[in-house]
Image: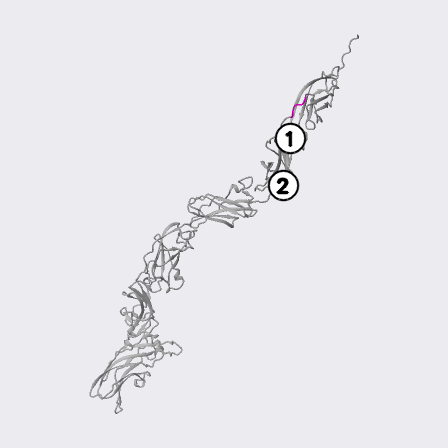
Amino acid sequence: MLRLISNILSIVLILMVIQLRATVTQSGSSDLEGNTGWLYDYSTLGSNDTTYLNNTVYKATFTFDVTDNHDSYFIYLGTDDNENGNYLDDQASWGTYVKSGIFSGSQTITAEALYSTLDDHNADYSNDDKKLKFFVRRRGTFDANTDTLELSGIYEWHLEPPQAPVTPDLQSGDDTGTSSTDNETNLSSLNFDVSSLPVSGTNFEVQLTKEAWSSNYWRSSNTSTALTALTITTSTTMTLQYDSFSDGTWYLRANVKDQYGSISYSGNRTVHVDTQAPSAPNILDLKTTSDTGSNTSDNKTNDQTPTFTITPSSGNIMGDDISRVYFSGTVVTLTDSIIASGSPNNQYSSDDITVQTGELTTDNEYQVYAIFIDDAGNASSSSDSLTFTLDTTEPSSPAKPDLESSDDTGFLTTDNLTNKGTLTDDIQLTIGSLTDSDIDSVYLVMDNTDTLGRIELGVGNTSYTFTVNGLSEADHTFKALVKDDAGNESADSQGLSVTIDTTASSRPTLDLKTSSDAGRKNDDNLTNDDTPTMTVENLSASDSVIFYDNGSSIQSSLVNAASMDITLNQLENGSHPLTVKAEDPAGNFSLTSTPTVNVRIDTDPPSQPDGPDLKDASDTGHANNDDNTSDTTPEFTIGSVTATIDSIVLNIAGQTIGQVPTGSSIDITVPLSISPDGNYTVYATKIDSAGNTTDGSSMTITIDTEDPSTPAAP
């Protein structure tokens, strides 16, 4: 039974009627209700279902007189299938009216009969235009008599319906929802275009009807409701309008009726009418993936295609609703990612909407709000506004990083050479010129690849110092960049090249230069030169050499050769244990020179020696103390000297004769003859071991080598 009902409900119906214009002859009349005739087209629904084509059912009412008493009357339909003028030889049972009991006298009987087995089971309607008649056959119960009464005149079959119209199409202007083809609307007056209409004078009429079921279910004539009056077709495409649609789902068809009363139906059009606005959205939320600054909740971004999450204030979002976003009163986009997901009938708790490329191009602070538009085109009230800032402007580049002078360990604090390269050594680099008000983060990048640090710059700060450690011994380039609070990144600053050098120079050697080693010996490091010149060797150009006196640094000099003579600053009298170290430009120190050079400074002059005394042997003449002599290489005695320490220089006639005394006095002989004869000044100079000198008192001697004149004879 259930299968039978299902089969019946699956039928596509085309109304069929026949022309009923003849009059009934004999003693009776008939009225065939053509508008209630149906042609059933079954389709196979399952392997156990039988296919039937063109099986017709007709309903007719007959009135005829009964003049004798019989129990039953049979109504027949006769079709002249073979067109031989004989209707009874092709008769078919239209139905049977049975009257039980004995009739007495004349009666008028009104009978309603059904005919359901017309033998026209092919698709070309073989009985179309064939002639037919109705008959009543009386059957006697007692005497078994039968007779046949011709109940009607000649009729014609008109079984084939008119051409079926195309399913009504809701005009796009009335399809107000998400799509102009989804048959969702918020209008109560709708226009439908119906095409493929037959046109022939006044023979065809078209009408819009409402069905009680969707197109998947069988309809009978009492399930249809006419929405428009029958209108004569004047064009193959016509517009049918109905002005009283209410909220809900409507199942609509167009039907065409021909001049015989046969009706054909279009397919079903389902239209959803909805005039109720959806609930307003909550305030929009900029997704963290679009909130590009370091703070992912400040609604500042450089993303010109940001994505917002929209949620309804109540209920859910339907899959074919629209989320529309406005930026300070301007519609920026009309996008719905839920539609793209392909589930229009699903319900969602939120929607992500992305601004499309080219729609948001001007940096500004915007008030952003949204509305929902449902699938019928109803718009909600707007959400509260979200303050949203678009900023795509790069901040200014920061200043070039600067190595802190305390970490620029060489003898120059501006050459960016440092020996801080061990795992525990720190160097500090300062980034300045951070003047843009919206700077959020500062980055330090080494060698264009390694980001060594990032900090969030506090309000009011215009510089930041990074601490870096564990750098390898090499040249490294440091750059800085900044990001603003919208995530825009500046261009790199100029690069700072820092050299990490932890390798010390070779150990230098030190010696007092001979020319500075004054005094009797030039290798005893005793001198009266209190700014002595030192010879330093095993040096490297560009280093600095540092002098130490008894371990304390006293001066330094830049190196320009492998061996240098360097004059020291003035030293005090006394011993000076001198050493040197080489310091390279990165501040690495060599080992201390060896051995220590003990330079003794003595600038005090010695005591005055005695004046020279011409020795008696050289004081020729009759007196040995008159300092007159004929000896041209005289010998003098000098006293008040110190043996082995002092040196005595005798100065006479341009000659300087130096000797080291061995006692408290010394005899010095003039080695070269003095000439010419005359008076000569003679003095002695005492020179101590450091080279300090003191002149003694002078004397005058007379050299006379001339023989006296011969005296006169006595």
Q: Is residue 607 magenta?
A: yes
Dot 2: what SS? loop
Rendering coords of residue 288 (x, y %): 42, 55
What's the residue type where badge 2 is placed? Arg
Quadrant of the image occupied by residue 345: bottom left
* Separation of marks 2 and 1 at Cα, in angstroms: 26 Å
Q: How is the image coloured?
A: one colour
Q: Quadrant of the N terminus?
A: bottom left
Q: Quick check: 13 above or below 69?
A: above
Quadrant of the image occupied by residue 45: bottom left
**Main secondary structure of the magenta stretch:** loop
Checking the image for residue 620, the label placed there is none
Q: Quick check: 244 above or below 525?
A: below
Dot 1: what SS? strand
Q: In the figure, is residue 670 to the left or right of 101?
A: right
- Range drawn in magenta: 606-610
Q: Tell me if residue 195 can be seen.
A: no
Q: Tell me if residue 256 can be seen.
A: yes
Find disc 2 in the rendering and name its residue. Answer: 507
Rendering coords of residue 418 (x, y %): 55, 43
Find disc 1 in the rendering and name its residue. Answer: 527
